[in-house]
Image: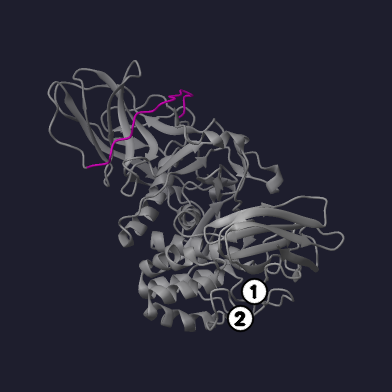
Amino acid sequence: MAHWKKQALDWAVLAALGLSLTACGGGGGSDDSTVMGNGDGIAGQRQATPPTPPTPTTPPTPEVPGTVQVQGIVRFESIPTKPTGGLDYAAQTAKPARYIRVDAIDVAGTVVAQGATDADGRYAMAVPPLRSIRVRMFASMVAPGSDSGQPSAEVADNTDKLALYTAITQPFTSGTSSAQHDIRIPSGWAPVDGGIELPSGRVAAPFAILDTIYTAQARVLASAPATVFPLLTVMWSKANTGSSSVSSIDVASGDIGGTQFLTVKGYPVMLLLGKAGVDTDEYDASVIAHEWGHYWQQSFSRDDSPGGTHEWGDLLDPTVAFSEGFATAWSGIALGRDSFVDSFGPQQKQGSATNLLAAPTDASRGWFREDSVQYLLRRLHDLHGPRVVLDAMAGPMRTSPANTGIHAFHQAVTAVSTSAAATLAPLLRTQAIEPNTDAWGIGETNGGGSTVALPMVQPLALGAAPTTACVSASFDPYRVGNRLGQIAYLRVAIPAAGTYRVTVDGPATTNPDFILRDTAGEVLRSFTTGSTTETAAAELKAGEHVIAVRDGNRSSSHACFQVSIQ
């Protein structure tokens, strides 16, 4: 498996994430209607201020005086993946579109009623009698866990100014009494092997994405029913494809680098591939649930990972290994699956399937491998349930000064459940991870063959002589910057709030960078180019802080920096 995950993409248009622009589809269907789209169900219409979404409830049955009730079930066509990967077009089925916003509009485009579907996809709206209306469905989910009825997830078109996807029926007359209007949103793919794209367009894609997100949310709510999910904006387009490098990313044109989760100006964003014949992710539930796992960790726990490309079996920085390992474990937990399945290639026929229950047994397993972390978290879940995993991450691990790695997770589990900790300790040994360490990994003996990975963190004394911190790119032939040994960590105790300056000096040919974090996250980032010295100051609170140092050139086979704080 390969995933992109880049945090802090600087794309100016995302400052408008608070706007919900809608784009509407063209005609199709009536009673038991199939939504017919223009292209992807987008006609280019915009609505700068969409209706306030209602709080989702079971649709009412009494009619309002002077109105008639239009009701029915909204379903979307869902395409499953084959057990070995690739999409199974011949097996597509209709699934309920759960907790999505709906409204009814007349021929002038005036909204005459608003509503939301329930857990079965049912909707009901009181509309004027004998009126020509259309039912419009928004790719906007107001499921349980939404904040005061506001959406918890929406799907927008990153190639069309963040237009919110909608699907819309052909006009029909409301009549003089209650009427049933069931709606089927088409996938846009013929139900035959090989996947022939149809003129209706891939209208169901945004609703399939929301369905996987709803499944992930529901899994959390089963253990933590008071959870309120911040709005997640999913950016999907049939133009979305990968990039050869992060520097070439152009989200507005569909060159998104790859499917990934990121935070932009404080907003959680998921980018999903959609280019037919290359890689389409709207029906790859494993992939979507994985990225949603990053969203949950970022929103409810803490994620210190720098992100970047990674492959199953890579030797990674411990924060990357934990972040990716958790996300993959969560994918299986949320979906109730024992494998991670993906599709790609011509006609989406190619794919891969990874067994999530298999323990890595090769000599390079350890705290720096995402598959080792994934196995440990999945086994802990299978033996103790999801709550211990979620509680440990949302509680002690979130507030720990230590980096977000498997050692910090072990200590967090110990704090929330002694029985789960007793289970986890021997499991750690199966992955060549020392359980008798602290949250910082002090006492770990497996360095993965790196000459600089141990100790996992070094002490740094305030106001003292510089401490030597060494890094190595020996496990990073592609200069990604997130491999084992490429980031050196130092911990420093700040006795009182005040202004402090960090200085990192490196040898010739290096370009030192550093990030300073406290328990709330990043406090200071200093990334400049063309200098062998990096220095910056910031206001710090009292308490323990971590400084992460790396060579911005990402090419040093071995380099040592002198790190100080005054």
Position of residue 516 in the picture relative to residue 148 (left or right): right
Is 55 within the magenta? yes
Q: Is residue 509 left or right of residue 47?
A: right
- Prevailing secondary structure class for the magenta stretch in the rendered image: loop
For residue 456, which numbered disc appears in the image?
1
Q: Where does the C terminus fall, quadrant-wise?
A: bottom right
Give the class, few, some or many, for how many residues have Cα within 10 Å of label 2's Cα (few <14, many ≥20).
Answer: some
* Magenta-highlighted residues: 42-57
Q: Judging from the image, what secondary structure is the residue with disc 2 in?
A: loop
First-in-chain label (1 vs 2): 2
> Which amino acid lies under the numbered mark 1 shown in the image of this protein?
Met
Assign the N terminus to one quadrant of the image. bottom right
- Above or below residue 73? Residue 397 is below
| 522, above or below 381, in the image | above
Few, some or many C-alpha atoms within 10 Å of disc 1 (few <14, some 14-19, many ≥20)?
many
Q: Nearer the viewer, residue 324 or 184?
A: 324
Residue 323, located in which quarter of the rendered image?
A: bottom right
Image coordinates of residue 329 in percent, x first then y, are 47, 65
Q: Does the magenta run of residues contain 475?
A: no
Q: Are marks 1 and 2 in contact (CB under 8 Å)?
A: yes
x and y percentages locating residue 565 in the rendered image = 70, 63
- Secondary structure at badge 1 equals loop
**Number of dots carrying numbers:** 2
Q: Is residue 461 depicted above or below 423 in this figure?
A: above
User: Residue at the spot x=36%, y=74% of the render?
Assistant: 384
The alpha-carbon separation of the residues under discs 1 and 2 comes to: 8 Å
Residue 544 location in percent, x, y? 57, 67
Residue identified by numbered label 2:
444
Using the image, tell me which numbered label, if any, was put on residue 208.
none
**Mark 2 residue type:** Glu
